[in-house]
Image (cartoon, coloured by chain):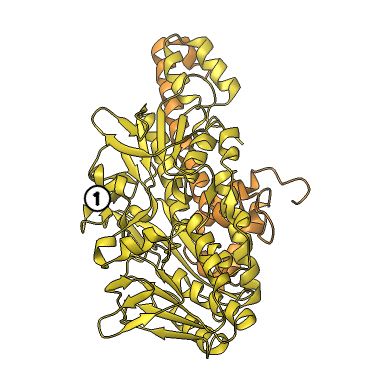
Amino acid sequence: MRVWISSPARLAAAAAALLAAGAALAQDAHRARNLAATCATCHGTDGQARGEMKVLAGLPAEQTVAAMTAYRSGARPAMVMQQIAKGYTDEQIQAVAGYFAAQPAPSPRR
Amino acid sequence: MDTTAAPFGRSRRRLLAGSAAGLGVALAACAGLRAGPSPGRVVVVGGGFGGATAARYLRLWGGPVDVTLVERSPQFVSCPMSNLVVAGYRTMSAITHSYDGLRALGVKVVQGEAVAIDAAARTVRLADGALLRYDRLIVSPGVDFMHEQVDGLAAALDSGRVTHAWKAGPQTAALRRQLADMPDGGVYAISIPPAPYRCPPAPYERACLVASYFRAAKPRSKVLVLDANPEIQSKRALFERAFAEHHAGILEYRPNAELKAVDGLTAKLEFEDVTAAVLNVVPPQRAADLARSAGLVNINGRWAGVNWLTMESTALPGVHVLGDATFPAPLMPKSGHMANQQAKVAAAAVIQLLQGEAVQADPLVMNACYSFVTPQLAIHVATVHRYDAAERSFRAVPGSGGLSPAAHALEGLQALAWADNIWADMLG
């Protein structure tokens, strides 16, 4: 970085590269957000669930991944989650889990 | 939470902006939508499961995107859970919700009826003459009825003697009142139209819940299900079991019983007439009037075709269509849950399109639909749909989805919790 700043042309190139990387990251962030939003219908916006539904906001990613993987294999019993988990790939589960882990855990349960 | 701005943290933004002239404009575009001028104006027509969710997520995800929601009713009344009201197990207030949560989020809620769309001028005209300009329009207009397919139906519904209760609100309350007023020993008949119609399992759920009510309150009464279809259209085995285990002696199911005409409280079928004490006709359905008059209906003369990556109409550029009005992808039900999921695909895409960005190439949507078979026991069907680039449509993910093994009280509790969560997800 320090070397690049000496040349205006290189600076522009560096800036363009950063912008491109930023756009790619932004796209990825939207993707995780969008995938997680498929869960929000039952588990609350950004995982802030109400009532009987499991709160996903603030759950460590490993925990969500472990639960989804166990639902998918049938190791963990469930009414509906086994059927839903089978619709998500490993990579999609990772993305969703990462998104919920980054959400603030709800304060007292409503 | 601020994922939009995350890729360009504050410090990096300062570094670049301070060291290179001319980057300011590009950076402002990338710095996220949290501050600065609105990237565009979005009008959403229809405040049901699709439209309200779209309006809310445009604000949650799109920062200063200018969002106006046009809805003819002052409050939202939910079709899901309305069968509990019909059968007397919930009140209207339990399924009625305010739009204040959307207002608090910055959505301009306009009570009115959209009557015309000018896709070239990018305007929506309301019944009162008001003209709303948009950069992108989202319509989630629901269904309207094909009255002309059943002789006498329009007049019967207008008279108030026959109800549909297939749009929640006054119709729901009216059917409840008729059932409450019906003397013991009467027949409640529900006519189901040929598929496709809004919410495939709902007529069977309604029949079950009314049968439960009759068993408890009017045990000499009957429920007669007149289904135009050759068999139960959703959760068939589970409903058949519920009919036999919980509603035998009260509920009678007749397949291939298409309604031809209505005369008073008499339902005229092909080979017989049935006179009921309470006649409830679920009419044949198509995309709502606005979709038709605006030229959005381009499939089978009934439904609106969409590009599934964006939910943009295949007929009118700049207009996105959600929910029951759309021609569905394979195995995709006309449900509130699905409309909520489609709304998020549309909201994300609209925000990106307003900024000239690429939209997500591999969206996913899912559906979980609960039906009560008694006031306590419920069953479900679930599906997950992944975008298939080759088919340019959503496809059910092989091996995913399924049905309840049996009706369960835990699923009844989950159904109620589902409702609380989806209402909050769409309305705040």
**Could you say where residue B249 lies in the image, as x and y percent from the top left?**
52, 91
Q: Nearer the viewer, residue B36 or A100?
A: B36
Q: Which of B417 and B292 is in front in this view?
A: B292
Give the chain of mark 1: B
Vertical relation: B186 (above or below) A12: below
Question: Badge 1: few (under 14), some or many (20 or more) residues near its Cα, within 10 Å?
Answer: many
Asked which quadrant contains residue B229, the reply is bottom left
Vertical relation: B23 (above or below) B201: above
Residue at the disc numbered 1: B297
The quadrant of the rendering that contains the N terminus of chain B is top right
- Residue B400 in sight: no
Q: Which residue lies furthest to the right in this view?
A: A108
Asked which quadrant contains residue B214, the reply is bottom right
Asked which quadrant contains residue B428, the reply is top right
**Could you say where residue B199 lies in the image, as x and y percent from the top left?**
42, 64
Residue at the (41%, 28%) spot, across then down: B41
Q: Which of B351 and B399 is in front in this view?
A: B351
| Chain painted in orange in the figure | A
**Could you say where residue B251 lies in the image, as x and y percent from the top left?**
49, 84
Q: What residue type is labelled 1?
A: Val
**Could you say where residue B209 lies in the image, as x and y percent from the top left?**
55, 75
| Chain painted in yellow in the figure | B
Vertical relation: B128 (above or below) B364: above
